[in-house]
Amino acid sequence: MSRETANHVRYIDKTRAYYEAEGYGKPYEWAHFDHIPLTPFAAVGKPLSECRVGMVTTSEMARRGVEAGPDDPKRLVYSLPTDIPVDELCSRKAAYDRYATTLDDVDSYLPLTHLHRFVAEGRIGAVAPRFQMIQSEYSQRKTLTVDAPEILKQMREDRVDVAVLAAV
Amino acid sequence: MSLAARYLEENGIPTVVFGCARDIVEHCGVPRFVFSDFPLGNPTGKPYDLDMQRQVLSLGLDLLVNATTAGTTVVTPYEWSADDSWKDKVLTKAQPFLDPEDTRKWLERKETYRALKATGKI
């Protein structure tokens, strides 16, 4: 086991201690399930080279240079086209390790450039026409009953076969 | 994010999750997970390291196709830096997770959301 795998940051413990010290009350209960679902890739019924790949991110992307509107109070899922060059995108996400890294390189958390290259090389069939932004929510109920169904709906409309999700 | 992956999977779409918070993702339980032991922010490779980004995504695509067991984690073979000092500073008083302005916005969003919920608009 490498140094890193043995020593990854325990965010659950650290978050609990951090917010307790800040005076917040009941600690957040992170989602936990005993059962993990699995749709085997074989169920898709075609090779990856023929699959349309969907992409979901928590990175709160916006078009660079376009004045950002007010925050959506309902914090609903929204989408942008996947054919926007990444240098025309920027992240509005505040919750990341701003001391150790940056979100200046989109492909380090939303790998659109590489997905398009894999299409050109025949590794995957296509990239879905839009990617989805999901907010990191306190309410697990909202994620499960509002956000996730919306992503599924959009992916079905876009005939997505498999999905890549990247959490900032 | 993990909840969304589970939901897609339950509805017939195979998924792979990329992330840097191993304990949170594994505590929830997702079908396929590519873990990079990096600071929160770059789950698909270091900024401007295109070769690494390509390799990380490639690992995920391999996992997507080859995983036979739910809850499979693949650890990327990359180190963020020569030492782990960045980890000691995560979520400490010396390095607040959000700056004051973002903390204010976060609390404001929470209140707005609660108000919408209380009036049945959500």
Image: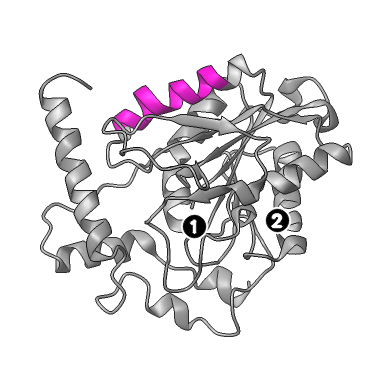
Q: Position of residue B8 (x, y in %)?
A: 54, 27
Q: Is residue A35 magenta?
A: no
Q: Which residues are magenta?
A: A141-154
Q: Position of residue B115 (x, y in %)?
A: 12, 31
Q: Which mark is residue B56?
A: 2
Can residue B2 be seen here? The reply is: yes
Count numbered badges in the picture: 2
Kindly state the secondary structure of the residue where label 1 is placed: helix
Q: Which mark is residue B22?
A: 1
The image quadrant that residue A157 belongs to is top right
The chain letter under disc 1 is: B
Residue in view at x 59 percent, y 79 percent: B81
Q: Position of residue B45 (x, y in %)?
A: 64, 61
Residue B73 as seen in the image, left or right of residue B40: right
The image quadrant that residue A122 belongs to is top right
Distance from the alpha carbon under mark 2 to that under mark 1 = 15 Å
Residue in view at x 30 percent, y 62 percent: B98
The chain letter under disc 2 is: B
State which mark lies toward you, 2 or 1. Answer: 2
The image quadrant that residue A17 belongs to is bottom left
Amino acid type, label 1: Arg
Amino acid type, label 2: Val
The residue nearer to you, when weighing A75 against A52, is A75
